[in-house]
Every structure is written in C-alpha cells, then in structure tokens.
Amino acid sequence: MIQRGYRALVLWIVWSAVAIVIYASMYQDTEVWEFVQHDPSRITWGIIALFGMGIVTSFVLTILLTLESVRVDYLETIAKTKGWLGIEDSNKQLCVANFFDSLKTVINNNGELNVEALVEVEFALYRRTAHALEVIGNLLITLGLVGTVVGLTLTLTGLTSSLEALGQDQEQLLRGLRGAMGGMGTAFYTTLLGSVLGGVLLRVYGYIDENGVDSLENALTRICLVYCSADFKPSAEREVRVLNQEIQLLTQKIEYLKKVLNESKTVVSDFTTELAELHKRETNPHSLEETIKLRKEYLDSLRQEFQLKRMNRGAWWKVLKKSFRKTD
C-alpha cells in the first residue's frame, strides 16, 4: 500500500507515464513534431512552451507537497503520544513550519483559534500554484482555438489566391493550394495540441496537485482537532501537562548528565590506576620525571642529528636523484 505522504508523487509519475504514451502515439500517427518544426504561424511552439512551463511548475509543487506530507505524517505519530508539546519541540519545514509557528503565536496570546482558516491562509501559496496549472491549461485550449482561426484564415487566403490564378499562373495556383493546405494543418494541429496538452494532460496534473494540497490540509486539521485540541485551551489540566512535559525533559537531561559523569569517573579511575602502577614500578619517586626528561633529551638529540645529516646531504629529492645516478 502506498504511504500517504508519497501518494501525490506516485500519481504524478503514473500520469507522466500515461502522458508519454499519449505523446508517442500522437508522434507516430499524426507526425505532429514534423509539423511543429515547419509551422508557419509558430502557435504550436507557444503551446508546447506553455505546456513545458506547466509541467515544471507541477513537478516542483508535487515535490514540495511530498516533503510536507511526509513531515506531517511524522508529526502525527508524535502528536498521538505527546500531543501539542511534542509537535512544538520537533523540527518542521516550509509551510508546515509557518503554520505551527502561527498556531503557537495564537495559543501563547490566548487568541481565538480557527484551525481551518489558519490552514487555508498558510497553504494559500500551494493552492494558488495548483490553480495556476488550471489557468495554463485553459490558455493552451485558447491558443488551440486561436490557431484554428489562424489556420482557417490561411486556408481562405490560399484558396483565394488559387482561384485568382486559375487558368493564368500555374505556379501561383500551386503556391496558393500549398498555403491552403498549410492553413488546414495549422488549424488541425493547434486544436489537437491545445486540447490534448491543456485540456487533458495538464488539467489532470492540476487535479493531482490540488488533491495533494487538500490531503495536506486535512492531515494538519485532523492533527490539531484530534490530538492537540486539549492543549489549545488555557486550563489547569494543560498547565499540569506542560509541567509534566518539562519534568520529563529535565529528567532526561539529568539522566544524560549522570551518564556523562559516570563515564568521567571511569576515565579518571583508569588514569589513577595507571599512575599508581607507574609509581609501583619505579623505586625512586623522581625517576618518572627523570625518565621523561631523558626521553625528551634523546629525542632532541635525534632531531639535531637528522638536521645535520640533511644539511650535509642536501634535500631529499637531491639525495634520491644521486641514488638513481649511482644505480645507472
């Protein structure tokens, strides 16, 4: 079963596969791409460009809704056990973060809380973006109709030119017929692209994104009304729950501090044991310090000896070069 947070993304991918199949069938059966390359009116270019912009917008919106939905699913699991206090302390992102920040401000100020209205306000950007996809789809249909009118105009112009050249100029007659056929192609293909890309494909993308926004808003409303409503109203019970939550957090910090202290005690005890063993091995109490000094003097003498050898023999690469010359 598909997880609720990924539902919009899965539907988007499935419909994209369907769109590719539809476009492939159009490309093979109608040779639409060949006409787009030679379209005299360039209206089909505008239709494809607007459709590409709508696809990119829909994909970005779907990714954002997926991230928000997955985060809301996680917050719902927290709210089931800890209520509003658990959500308040957790990390949030994007519009979900803005929603909970606004909700926290209203609660702290003891204001009148309207969860549904707040959800609509905070997620208005997503809903406007989803509505923009529908507007782009309508524009594609309109461009298809404009292309139909332009194509019919080109057809009439070509037929008029052909009729005028009938029996007089054979080349002009053929040129007029070609213009008429090109106009019919413009009328047909612009209507086809506008209706399929805008009226079918992009409209379904917009429906998927609107459904994702509705699902996200419903999930947040359910969390607030079912799991967190008791913590919104100022009351003695809410204060007791807040106090219990603070006590639990303080207890967790104390336990962590105890753990760190125990580890520190263990380290100090091990260090003390090692020092005691060193003192047992040495008969003279000052022998440890003398041994350290002797070791240090020995290391200094070695360092000076290496420096002298380096000065006498030159840099390491020169020594290496000399060694290669000797082998040769």
Image (cartoon, helix red, strand yellow):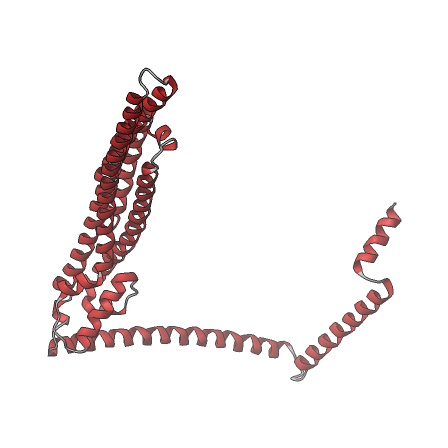
Please indicate whether residue 230 sits to the left or right of residue 45 in the image.
Answer: left
Q: Does residue 274 sit above or below 145 in this rendering? A: below
- Of residue 316 and residue 306, the one placed in the foreground of this image is 316
Quadrant where the N terminus is found in the figure = top left
The residue lying at 17 percent from left, 65 percent from top is 118
Indicate the position of residue 177 as horizontal and vertical percent values.
Answer: 32, 22
Query: Is residue 1 at all visible to an observer of this figure?
Result: no
Quarter of the image where one finds residue 25: top left
Residue nearer the viewer, 210 or 82: 210
| Residue situated furthest front in the rendering | 168
Residue shown at the point (79%, 57%) measured from the top left = 317
Q: Is residue 239 visible?
A: yes
**Image location of residue 238, percent across then percent down:** 14, 75
Residues 69 and 76: in front is 69
Residue 129 in the image: x percent, y percent? 25, 53
Please tell me which residue is depicted at 84% across the width and 67% down the height of the picture: 311
Question: Which is nearer the eye, 111 or 1?
Answer: 111
Q: Position of residue 102 (x, y in %)?
A: 22, 70
